[in-house]
Image (spheres, rainbow, N blue to C red):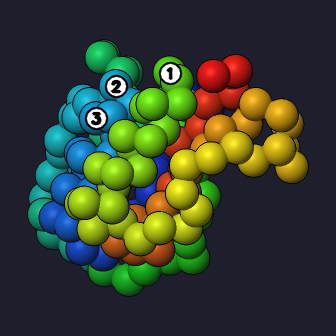
Amino acid sequence: MIDHISSYATDFDSTMAFYRAALAKLGYGLQLDRVFEADPDLPGRRASAFGPDGNPTFWVIEVLEASSPRHIAFAAADRRSVDAFHRAGLAAGGVDLGGPGLRPIYHPNYYGAFLADPDGNNVEAVFHGPE
């Protein structure tokens, strides 16, 4: 249903390091890098997109001021990928908002992990199948 979505970063370099590390564990790589020279508010504004090969789905866009935190959940191929996402995100500066584990409040096989990125956004990896 969603073609692409954006999040925003006041510390673009730290945020990109976080997403490079965490999303690589889910099989999502950097697809595009752009610099917008003509932006009057922030000349040289950077924007980068992650996703599966050839599909720039999740954009990180540089901003001057933080916006209200967002929540985004990335699909994982299995529970091991959720675990790896969480470890890599922590190592890259993420803050633990809930370690890997079952969240039966959603459904019996909901296995997720939650991190805050450098701008405080709630970033999740989730797998919906049995172990």
Task: Indicate the quadrant containing the C terminus: top left, top right, bottom left or bottom right.
Answer: top right
Q: Which residue is pictured at 83% across the width and 44% down the height? A: 104
* Residue 64 circle label: none
Provide the secondary structure element on which disc 1 rests: loop
N-term mark: 3 or 1: 3
Q: Which residue is mark 1?
A: 77
Q: Position of residue 120 (x, y in %)?
A: 47, 74
* Residue 27 circle label: 2
The answer to the question of whether label 3 and label 2 lie on touching residues, with beta carbons closer than 8 A, is yes
Q: Which residue is pictured at 33% across the width and 61% down the height? A: 90
Q: Nearer the viewer, residue 24 or 52?
A: 24
Q: Amino acid at mark 2?
A: Gly
Q: Amino acid at mark 3?
A: Ala
Q: Amino acid at mark 1?
A: Ala
What's the distance in space between the residues labelled 3 and 1, CA to CA?
Answer: 12 Å
Q: Nearer the viewer, residue 91 or 8?
A: 91
Q: Which residue is mark 3?
A: 24
The answer to the question of whether label 3 and label 1 lie on touching residues, with beta carbons closer than 8 A, is no
Q: Which residue is pictured at 30% across the width and 17% down the height? A: 53
